[in-house]
Image: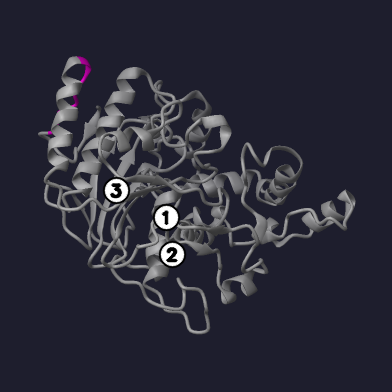
Amino acid sequence: MILMNSMNPASCRFMNANYKYYIILVFSTLLIAANQYPIFLIHGFMGWGRDELLNHYYWGGEEDLQSILEAEGFVVHTLSVGPISSNWERAIEAYTQIKGGCVDYGTSHSQQYQIIQKPINKCYDGIYPDWDEHHPIHIIGHSQGGLTARMLEYLLELEMIGENSSLLKNKHIGYIKSITTLSTPHNGTTLSFLINDKYPVLQKMSAYAGLLNNLLFKNLYNFDLEHWNLRKRKTETYYQFMQRINNSNIRTTKNSASWDLSLEGSQYFNDISKSSDSTYYFSYSTTASSEYGNIGQHKPKSNMNYYLKPASRLIGSDPSPPNLSWYENDGIVNTISMDGPHDEKIIQYDGSAIPGIWQHMGKIEYDHHQILLRKLDDYGKVDIFNLYLDHCYLLYQL
């Protein structure tokens, strides 16, 4: 692996014949694990669940990362939350899928943004009903999934007067053992502003995602926007349905992923949320661009996936970045934004995990999707898979 500031300098990246010995090593360490709390994976913006996209996995691409890690002895579950929803809504969906029950976005939040507080067909048996402070969980979030994990912790430790949901009405301290973020824009991504500035119509078109789900491919990909009341009613014509979509608040709201991923939206969340003293925090940064010219701008490297290169060039040539360090990117997110919330303490991981502090695991030279084992050659897949093995082993030693 091309790994700078690696989380474990002594850790080997085994290939071919040596790989089986690495697996034996992992199995032996599991026997003396300090914990075996379940690990939950949360996808990022425009992500999907395990039963969508014809078994092309968000976590693994052609491979199924969850199954592979389970085969190595780890307890792993994949969550599926709203791909373009706000972190508040995604966090509540994650909580309900884990604990069980029916989604309740909260009275205050629902009234403020005029959404359905308790949408039908969003009830779950619960993947881990015993979840509490004595049976905590680990969360690994990619991109926006990392922000969703942080929002979930924020809501767990919040007590909101006047709310009746099991999540919002009481504090739940100690429910999360660790949060690990991969390529997460903790401080926002300039791509959000650049796209909305150049193509403001894109957020307005988000309302039509509900139409696509109704007409075309809900079983293939679900935008999960029932709470915006974008489902066609039996009593209305398609013309009436279109008129209602055109008037939907989703077209201009700040209750969306695009706001949460912006520099302003991220700063707002960083201002109200703080790290928990009992939670371990780990972050991985990704980079796939290189500097060119005289003013520090960046262009995509040759190994970046071709479909990410236009966005990478956009980020790398931003005419007004916060500063020049924001040019480096992985095709979607500014690398400088990935190490943790910049108003909190961030240190380089040195082999000793410390709760309550963001520990940066290093800068990895892969793009935004390659870190998920997607669009990689065989060498890269083994390289990244070993990173997941190393990290899951670390989580089980906390």
Q: Earlier in the sequence, mark 3 or mark 2?
A: 2
Up-down: is 61 above or below 280? above
Residue topped by disc 1: 147
Q: Are marks 2 and 1 in contact (CB under 8 Å)?
A: yes
Quarter of the view holding residue 46: top right
| Type of amino acid under label 2 | Phe
- Percent across and percent down for residue 224 are 61, 51
According to the image, label 3 marks what residue? 283
First in sequence: mark 2 vs mark 1: 1
Q: Is residue 13 magenta?
A: yes
**Dominant secondary structure of the magenta stretch?**
loop
Kind of element beneath mark 1? helix
Q: CA distance from mark 2 to mark 1?
A: 9 Å
Residue 296 in view in this figure: no
- Identity, as a three-letter code, of the amino acid under mark 3: Ser
Q: Is residue 279 left or right of residue 24?
A: right
Which region of the structure is painted magenta?
A: 11-16
* Cα–Cα gap, marks 1 and 3: 12 Å
